Image (cartoon, coloured by chain):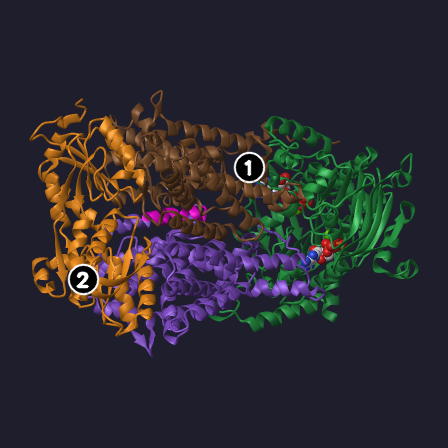
Chain colours: A purple, B green, C orange, D brown
């Protein structure tokens, strides 16, 4: 039972001015951190950072992380977790490339295959969580480990490369109107996922299940089914990221996508502090991913030591989420 | 409305009516505990059937079975004459059943509109929401209720009574033929309750059958046409409401006579005794403004007020749960400014919070763990050890002292009935040995029997020298107090001695009207 | 002190051999192990392998497991031998010799198949030659891996007498491809076209391939990219002219050669003099790619 | 007062037999999975698996994972998460060894240093969570990333080795009565942590906070302080694992302890299904760690392919938790 109506955040009209300021920080704190980052780097690196090319470049770098993180957002919105996304991305890359090498399938078919892989793993996650009643963290850790096993069984653990990767590489390197395809994919998918989450019955049901599963169940929402759907969407996005990653280099490795797991979590949590009070949403996740990319880009351009990169990334995450969170608490106390 | 009149006539006619809902021979076990045994009810269109029984009698379980939230071990359900199987909430929805469940079942982060729309299957074409249609429908429902909650306000920002209105609104979003309401008025003021009765009248006039659950027996007798009483999961009997009065209904429910709330009689008037707590100009905008009060040793001080008067906020300030804006307090002659409930409990001030499930209990923990929770304190300066054996012994004593009905002190409190849960929350704080115990709505959702037992506990504590501050919206029960304060819009507006603390007088003071005008009010 | 089990110290006996892999994702060591096992199986020796998934603690544990199993020889892979002390000590106490595939020698680990310095040298030489001793170089290194440290040493000593300016970034694993792309992109922005001879060196092929992706998306073709290992993607990239050179490790062959030494390892016992076994390799460049592909047609898969 | 106790004997008698069976599975399902594993491997590998030496061996292998996982259990009991434990273990190993090399400190001092490092990181985690009001996942991900940065700053990313590791290595290699020291440490720490969690006010408070933080707060428990304590204990255990890992290998690498993160989570979640209904507890975590070790040992002895290892580990986790979970649901329905 998760009925927690204890938030004593109070009615706005009668609030003192300080509360309004805090409230503003609560909403825009994370965006403020992003803005400071952009302005700061623009001053330090005016000729390389603040250019149109670099802007497109940053968007392009964000695309793959964004796709997997937006998928993860669906699991998080529904109140679940998915620790298998990194493994799914790896699996999808390896299986699709192996199949392209062995069976010589076309790129659209490979993309379909990726979607299928993601859907199957997502379905398994969902079924273990709903039918076996296993905590999502355990279930997805387990299924993710199984996915690694399948990955090894398929390609024996060795990297898979395409003999003639030309047109496959174009999938992520190609440009339209000077903008790389992945940017279109990211934005298109963001639009679709935003619509699904905010303008469909399924999306509302997911939010309801995440907000109060008991209430959702009692109001006739088929909670288990909604959960399974969330895992499936999450899996599909992870698999798409996997095949796009493979397309970047024309090859896929057994743990190629693993690093996306924590990156996607970081982005989604950062995003939950963007404009909302700790709720996950598609737009926020997108901002989260872009903030992380901007940060990384800034560090690389300024040329900081390795340890600065990590210190900076860690602090960015804490501050981005913390400023808003702290401000909201103060707003409530004021 | 000639149709409605014709319908009314029909309802009075002695011909056997067609039933819209019949539950026959329903049984349900929870892990060996028989919650329902061979219970049958029957409800006719356009009538109100009240379900009465003590806490844990099985009322909610019966409703939850009907809603598809639990499955019955045995029994059949007929809706409009045909036998149905309800295995999930959506089955119930499809059959035209609608519910207000006992526990608030809203999504806190959703707006009122989103909550009302939740589960409305046909949201639009191809699964896409038709926001405009939903909003129109929600507005219609609100018009019908005659009460407007801002549709775009988030539920977590709404007052408790508004939340219940949203819950009520949701149950009316679909055109249901049967509506089951499980304690809908527990958090309502009299005025809001009256509005609900109006809605019920309207629904029954449309031929909707209402299943109604409440522990407020006068209300039951006012609203219901028929009353079915359960005791320990078994049917006691079904009665016409007109055959019953509060005393006889109480007898059916409890199986014995319960004396009404009586005024407190003490040998020495505690209000003349030594002072324990004084509060000067306590303020926390916007809900608490310049509150001053004095509480004596062994005194039971009541706080009356409408919902939203700021009583809960005041209580939270007294235990340091929220930061104080301005003002000062002294406890036992010494300055008292608690910065957390920890400080308060250390100083001997404890609060029994108003929402027992979310604020009072750890539902999956055992009775003994919950009872011991407020007495866990490191002895100054060293690591305190914890002895489960001692905890169990203390819990056993408390269980018998407070009359808590449980199969064992190891049972999870989530499985107990509401009244027993409430006794555990009270008991937990009593075991902490406070000099001042604040109780916020201690009897909401508690049955008549358990209620008088809670009064006994309170009186016993006061007799032992503990001071009591009791917040209540049920003005009748304030009769156990020595003195009653009235709060309105964040300030204390009156202090009434026990002898004058009648229900009507308090109500009038709460509304800020003088008692003469109120007494003319035909309620 | 012959507790070595069935094999004893005999000459043409059969051996039981326990292999502790690094991680099945590490292609080179996997190939070497495959070559090793293929040869061993042909001899009728019994081999078993565990994958500690990169966890050094598990690797030590697995070595102890093999001690329990009383194998005749333990082979470890990639893990820095100095981090396998517990396992090595347990093996030594039980009289079981340990050898390593590219993890270096240490107390109780008597032989090593080198994958570091010797693989770094050819490509470093080629790089200095291509740049003509001047220009800017982006180094994408990985200090936590022994082979990478060796390769970077080889690069550093080749660069010592030149005026090549280097920028170094530490590549994280996993996530090496994405991070390399981003490092390269930033570096490219600071080194625009025409700013002199430019090159990027990766201590293995993944960073090099990440760099290729950055080059393509920036539309640049004035930067030479170097990798090491010769994994399929890199060979394809050289074929397409996107990369300049890599070192193709003949790991399978090397593993086979290593396996031929097993009787010596066993005979030498735990106190044998440490020996380094060179890993055979081929430098592949855009100039030699066609010949290379005729000889190793499967190297792009 | 009225009669109070429902007759318990009469009540249980009416329970259907099937419910009792399911209930049994719910409690002992996870242990059953372990038992099947042990019996199965004993049959397949009678001479090597089912020996006293191998038993000690398995315990020895479990020790380090057990210490970090039991620490994590404290965070989980309190309703929090700690994603920084792997990084803390790495940091502790690197810092302690660097200091031993540079400053020539003795082993007890190094151990104290490790405890200090763990406590500081845990404190930071706790403060970010309680004072800044940041979700524990974000906070510990952020602080963990900062810890990686500090790690790079200390040793530049290269592995640190001791010139003469002899006595330091004895810390984990030494034996008393034929049993390696780490086994004693694991069991000793388990006893202490069990006592703290179950027999002290602090431990009870942690369980209360994990159960319902609002109720705990209103019961006079200093929720924030209890949370900070949980993070500190968690950090200290992680740091101890880190220095023991360094001792086992005689050296420390920048990401040496990272792999403990998911392993510890898996063990703790597996453990939550042992004897309890999804509650985290020290004994359960210990069983979880040992189950994973037995599984790994079994695979090593039988000699399965890599992909089997992963498939097996994934299924072990899902089944271990799932059997109990499913059974409990059935028991409730029966
Ligand atoms: N921050 C808030 N935002 C919205 N509503 C709030 C907030 N704080 C309190 N409320 C609600 O406003 C009402 C008034 O607050 P308060 O609890 O102080 O009054 P009360 O007299 O104790 O009312 P009740 O009779 O419900 O206890 C309560 O119903 C409470 O739930
Ligand atoms: N999920 C459950 N698991 C175990 N026991 C339960 C469960 N739900 C209800 N019970 C038990 O079934 C009995 C009937 O509970 P129910 O909630 O129906 O009572 P009620 O009449 O609605 O009481 P109240 O007036 O307090 O709401 C109680 O003894 C309760 O402890
Ligand atoms: Mg009820
Ligand atoms: Mg209140």
Residue matched to label 1: B31
Percent of width and height locating residue C127: 18, 62
Query: Residue under mark 1: which chain is it in?
Result: B
Left or right: D213, with A138 as reference point: right
Residue B356, magenta (yes or no)? no
State the CA–CA distance, disc 1 to disc 2.
Answer: 78 Å
Vertically, is B228 above or below B461? Answer: below
Q: Which residues are magenta?
A: A135-146
Look at the numbered disc 2 and give the secondary structure of its residue: helix
Q: Secondary structure at mark 1?
A: loop
Give B356 or B55, whichever is nearer the viewer: B356
Q: Is residue A138 magenta?
A: yes
Instruction: Classify residue B205 as left or right of residue D141.
Output: right
Q: Which residue is mark 2?
A: C128
Q: Residue at x 91, y 49 (%)?
A: B500
Density class for disc 1 (Cα within 10 Å; few <14, some 14-19, many ≥20) is some
- Residue B6 lies, in percent from the top left, at 73, 66
Residue visible at 64% across and 35% down in the picture: B376
* Residue D125 higher or lower than B406, as above or below: below
Q: Nearer the viewer, mark 1 or mark 2?
A: 2
- Asked whether residue A219 is in view, the answer is yes
- Give neighbour class at mark 2: few <14, some 14-19, many 20+ (Cα, 10 Å): many
Quarter of the figure with residue C61:
top left
Q: State yes or no: Cβ of the residue under disc 1 lies below 8 Å from any atom of ligand 2.
A: yes
Q: Which image quarter is the N terminus of chain C in?
A: top left
């Amino acid at each position: 039972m998760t009925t927690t109506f204890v938030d004593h955040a109070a009615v706005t009209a009668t609030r003192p001015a300080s509360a309004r300021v805090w409230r503003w920080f609560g909403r825009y704190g994370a965006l403020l951190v992003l803005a400071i980052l952009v302005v700061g780097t623009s001053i330090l690196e005016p000729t390389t950072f603040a250019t149109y090319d670099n802007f497109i470049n940053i968007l392009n770098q964000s695309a793959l992380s964004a796709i997997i993180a937006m998928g993860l957002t669906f699991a998080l919105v529904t109140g679940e977790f998915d620790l298998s996304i990194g493994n799914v991305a790896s699996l999808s890359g390896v299986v699709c490339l192996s199949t392209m090498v062995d069976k010589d399938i076309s790129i659209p078919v490979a993309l379909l295959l990726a979607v299928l892989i993601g859907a199957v793993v997502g379905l398994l996650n969902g079924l273990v969580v709903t039918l076996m009643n296993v905590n999502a963290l355990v279930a997805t850790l387990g299924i993710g480990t199984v996915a690694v096993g399948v990955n090894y069984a398929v390609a024996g653990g060795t990297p898979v490369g395409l003999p003639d990767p030309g047109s496959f590489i174009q999938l992520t390197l190609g440009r339209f109107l000077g903008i790389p395809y992945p940017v279109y994919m990211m934005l298109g998918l963001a639009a679709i996922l935003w619509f699904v989450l905010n303008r469909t019955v399924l999306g509302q049901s997911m939010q309801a299940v995440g907000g109060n599963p008991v209430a959702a169940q009692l109001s006739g929402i088929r909670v288990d089914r909604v959960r399974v759907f969330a895992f499936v969407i999450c899996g599909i996005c992870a698999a798409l990221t996997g095949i796009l990653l493979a397309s970047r280099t024309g090859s896929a490795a057994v743990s190629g996508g693993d690093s996306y797991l924590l990156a996607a979590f970081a982005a989604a949590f950062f995003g939950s502090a963007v404009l909302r009070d700790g709720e996950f949403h598609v737009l926020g996740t997108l901002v989260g991913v872009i903030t992380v990319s901007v940060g990384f880009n800034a560090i690389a351009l300024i040329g900081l030591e390795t340890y600065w990169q990590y210190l900076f990334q860690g602090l960015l995450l804490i501050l981005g989420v913390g400023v808003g969170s702290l401000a909201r608490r103060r707003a409530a106390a004021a | 409305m000639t149709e409605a009149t014709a319908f009314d006539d029909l309802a009075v006619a002695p011909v056997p009516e067609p039933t819209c809902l019949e539950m026959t021979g329903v049984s349900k076990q929870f892990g060996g505990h028989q919650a329902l045994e061979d219970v049958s009810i029957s409800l006719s269109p356009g009538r109100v059937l009240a379900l009465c029984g003590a806490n844990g009698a099985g009322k909610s379980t019966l409703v939850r079975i009907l809603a598809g939230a639990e499955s019955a071990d045995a029994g059949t359900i007929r809706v409009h004459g045909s036998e149905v199987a309800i295995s999930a909430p959506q089955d119930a929805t499809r059959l035209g059943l609608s519910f207000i469940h006992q526990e608030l079942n809203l999504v806190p982060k959703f707006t009122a509109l989103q909550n009302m729309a939740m589960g409305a299957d046909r949201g639009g074409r191809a699964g896409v929401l038709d926001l405009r249609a939903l909003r129109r429908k929600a507005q219609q429902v609100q018009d019908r209720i005659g009460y407007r909650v801002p549709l775009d306000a988030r539920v977590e920002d709404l007052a408790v009574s508004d939340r219940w209105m949203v819950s009520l609104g949701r149950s009316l979003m679909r055109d249901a033929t049967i509506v089951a309401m499980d304690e809908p008025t527990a958090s309502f003021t009299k005025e809001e309750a009256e509005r609900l009765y109006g809605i019920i009248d309207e629904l029954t006039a449309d031929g909707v059958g209402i299943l109604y659950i409440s522990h407020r027996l006068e209300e039951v007798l006012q609203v219901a046409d028929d009353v079915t009483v359960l005791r320990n999961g078994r049917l006691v009997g079904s009665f016409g409401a007109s055959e019953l009065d509060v005393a006889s209904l109480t007898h059916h429910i409890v199986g014995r006579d319960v004396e009404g709330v009586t005024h407190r009689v003490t040998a020495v008037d505690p209000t003349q005794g030594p002072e324990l707590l004084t509060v000067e100009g306590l303020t926390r905008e916007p809900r608490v403004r310049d509150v001053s009060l004095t509480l004596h040793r062994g005194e039971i001080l009541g706080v009356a007020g409408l919902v939203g008067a700021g009583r809960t906020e005041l209580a939270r300030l007294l235990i340091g749960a929220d930061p104080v804006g301005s003002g000062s307090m002294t406890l036992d002659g010494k300055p008292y400014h608690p910065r957390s409930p920890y400080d308060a409990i250390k100083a001997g001030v404890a609060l029994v919070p108003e929402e027992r499930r979310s604020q009072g209990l750890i539902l999956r923990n055992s009775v003994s763990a919950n009872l011991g929770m407020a007495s866990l304190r490191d002895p100054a300066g060293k690591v305190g050890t914890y002895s489960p054996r001692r905890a169990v012994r203390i819990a056993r004593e408390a269980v018998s002292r407070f009359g808590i009905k449980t199969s064992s002190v190891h049972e999870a409190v989530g499985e107990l009935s509401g009244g027993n849960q409430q006794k555990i929350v009270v008991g937990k704080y009593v075991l902490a040995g406070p000099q001042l115990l604040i109780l916020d709505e201690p009897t909401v959702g508690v049955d008549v029997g358990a209620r008088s037992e809670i009064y006994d506990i309170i009186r016993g504590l006061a007799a032992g020298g503990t001071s009591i501050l009791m917040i209540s919206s049920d003005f009748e029960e304030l009769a156990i107090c020595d003195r009653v304060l009235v709060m309105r819009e964040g300030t204390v507006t009156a202090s009434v001695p026990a002898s004058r603390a009648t229900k009507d007088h308090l109500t009038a003071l709460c509304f800020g009207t003088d008692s003469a005008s109120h007494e003319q009010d035909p309620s | 002190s012959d507790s070595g089990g069935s094999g004893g110290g005999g000459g043409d006996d059969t051996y039981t051999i326990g292999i502790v892999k690094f991680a099945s994702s590490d292609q080179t060591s996997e190939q070497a192990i495959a070559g090793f096992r293929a040869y061993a199986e042909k001899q009728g020796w019994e081999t078993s392998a565990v994958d500690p998934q990169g966890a050094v603690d598990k690797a030590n544990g697995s070595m102890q497991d093999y001690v329990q199993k009383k194998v005749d020889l333990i082979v470890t892979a990639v893990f820095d031998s100095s981090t396998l002390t517990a396992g090595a000590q347990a093996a030594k106490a039980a009289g079981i010799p340990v050898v390593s595939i590219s993890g270096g020698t240490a107390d109780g680990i008597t032989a090593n198949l080198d994958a570091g310095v010797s693989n770094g040298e050819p490509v470093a030489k080629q790089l200095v030659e291509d740049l003509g001793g001047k220009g800017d170089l982006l180094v994408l290194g990985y200090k936590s891996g022994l082979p990478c440290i060796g390769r970077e040493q080889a690069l550093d000593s080749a660069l010592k007498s030149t005026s090549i300016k280097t920028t170094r970034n530490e590549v994280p694993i996993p996530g090496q491809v994405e991070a390399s792309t981003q490092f390269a992109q930033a570096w490219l922005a600071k080194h625009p076209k025409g700013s002199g001879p430019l090159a990027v060196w990766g201590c293995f092929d993944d960073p090099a391939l990440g760099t290729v992706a950055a080059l393509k998306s920036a539309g640049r073709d004035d930067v030479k990219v170097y990798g090491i290992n010769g994994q399929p993607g890199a060979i394809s990239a050289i074929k397409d002219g996107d990369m300049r050179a890599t070192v193709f490790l003949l790991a399978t062959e090397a593993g086979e050669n290593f396996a031929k030494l097993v009787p010596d390892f066993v005979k030498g016992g735990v106190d044998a003099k440490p020996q380094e076994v060179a890993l055979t390799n081929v430098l592949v460049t855009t100039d030699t790619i066609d010949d290379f592909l005729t000889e190793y047609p499967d190297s792009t898969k």
